[in-house]
Image (tube, helix red, strand yellow):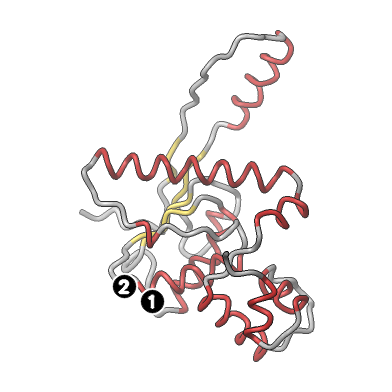
């Protein structure tokens, strides 16, 4: 059985509510820096991930969709490595549930346990600021020491320091095609491919 919020609270000597506030990085909460640090240390030590069922209850189908997308991204990542005959290290594939605080903790843990890592590939833009801060707080430089690439681009990516390299998706074309299919009331299944674009920014070192 995996680590639960209750186990984290007991190990840290705090309430369930306090752990929840720390995990979700709730602004304005009265959690002292000392208590927050103690809770985060326990979260990292026990490798705690928020319960998927609770997440689904809290956010409906949204989290389920994100989990599905994440699974597909990881599947594609592994396929790409296999195609290039690169060994897959499952220890550096982690889930942060698109949560800022969790992404920060996971990034710090990977950097500590796997110092040979040279890049992070993020499934969602929500985790990019946390990943970037964790790398900087570890005394490393982006992109000199570590590169960052995000699977989904957003208006946040160019504003970070350095700006984050990300994949831009043709959302307008995708929405237009979806609307057309709905209006046509098509019953047959069809695979439709859309072309994405890699927007190279300062988080990746392009020097040969």
Which residue is depicted at the point 59% across and 47% down? Answer: 67
**Residue 198 vs residue 100, the one in the foreground:** 100
Residue under pointer 1: 112
- Give the x, y percent position of residue 175: 65, 26
Which residue is depicted at the point 31% across and 67% down? Answer: 144
**Crowd band around label 1 with a 10 angstrom C-alpha radius: few (<14), some (14–19), many (20+):** few
Badge count: 2
**Residue 23 vs residue 157, the one in the foreground:** 23
Q: Indicate the secondary structure of the residue bearing disc 2.
A: loop
Q: Is residue 62 above or below residue 40?
A: above
Specify the label residue 115 is tagged with.
2
Relative side of 53 to 91, left or right: right
**Is the Cβ of the residue at disc 2 closer than 8 Å to that at disc 1?**
yes
- Give the x, y percent position of residue 121: 42, 54
Q: Is residue 158 above or below residue 28?
A: above
Which residue is depicted at the point 25% across and 55% down? Answer: 207
Residue extending furthest toward the front: 1
- Give the x, y percent position of residue 85: 21, 44
**Crowd band around label 2 with a 10 angstrom C-alpha radius: few (<14), some (14–19), many (20+):** few
Residue extending furthest toward the bottom: 34
Which residue is depicted at the point 48% across and 67% down? Answer: 132
Relative side of 76 to 183, left or right: left
**Residue 10 vs residue 26, the one in the foreground:** 10
Relative side of 127 to 90, left or right: right
Q: Quadrant of residue 11?
A: bottom right
Specify the label residue 1 is tagged with.
none
What whole-number distance in Å separates the C-alpha atoms at marks 2 and 1?
Answer: 6 Å
- Give the x, y percent position of residue 126: 60, 56
| Quarter of the image that includes the N terminus | bottom right
Q: Quadrant of residue 101?
A: bottom right
Q: Indicate the secondary structure of the residue bearing disc 1.
A: helix
């Amino acid at each position: 059985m995996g680590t639960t919020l209750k186990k984290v609270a007991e190990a840290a000597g705090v309430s369930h509510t306090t752990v929840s506030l720390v995990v979700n990085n709730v602004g304005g909460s009265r959690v002292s820096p000392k208590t927050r640090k103690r809770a985060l240390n326990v979260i990292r030590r026990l490798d705690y991930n928020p319960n998927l069922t609770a997440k689904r209850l809290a956010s409906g189908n949204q989290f389920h969709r994100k989990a599905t997308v994440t699974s597909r991204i990881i599947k594609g990542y592994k396929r790409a490595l296999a195609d290039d005959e690169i060994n897959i290290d499952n220890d550096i594939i982690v889930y942060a549930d698109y949560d800022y605080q969790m992404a920060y903790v996971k990034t710090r843990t990977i950097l500590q346990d796997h110092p040979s890592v040279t890049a992070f590939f993020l499934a969602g833009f929500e985790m990019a600021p946390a990943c970037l801060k964790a790398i900087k707080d570890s005394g490393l430089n982006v992109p000199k020491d570590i590169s960052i690439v995000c699977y989904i681009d957003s208006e946040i990516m160019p504003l970070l320091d350095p700006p984050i390299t990300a994949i831009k998706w043709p959302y307008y074309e995708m929405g237009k095609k979806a609307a057309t299919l709905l209006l046509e009331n098509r019953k047959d299944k069809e695979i439709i491919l859309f072309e994405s674009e890699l927007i190279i920014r300062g988080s990746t070192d392009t020097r040969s």
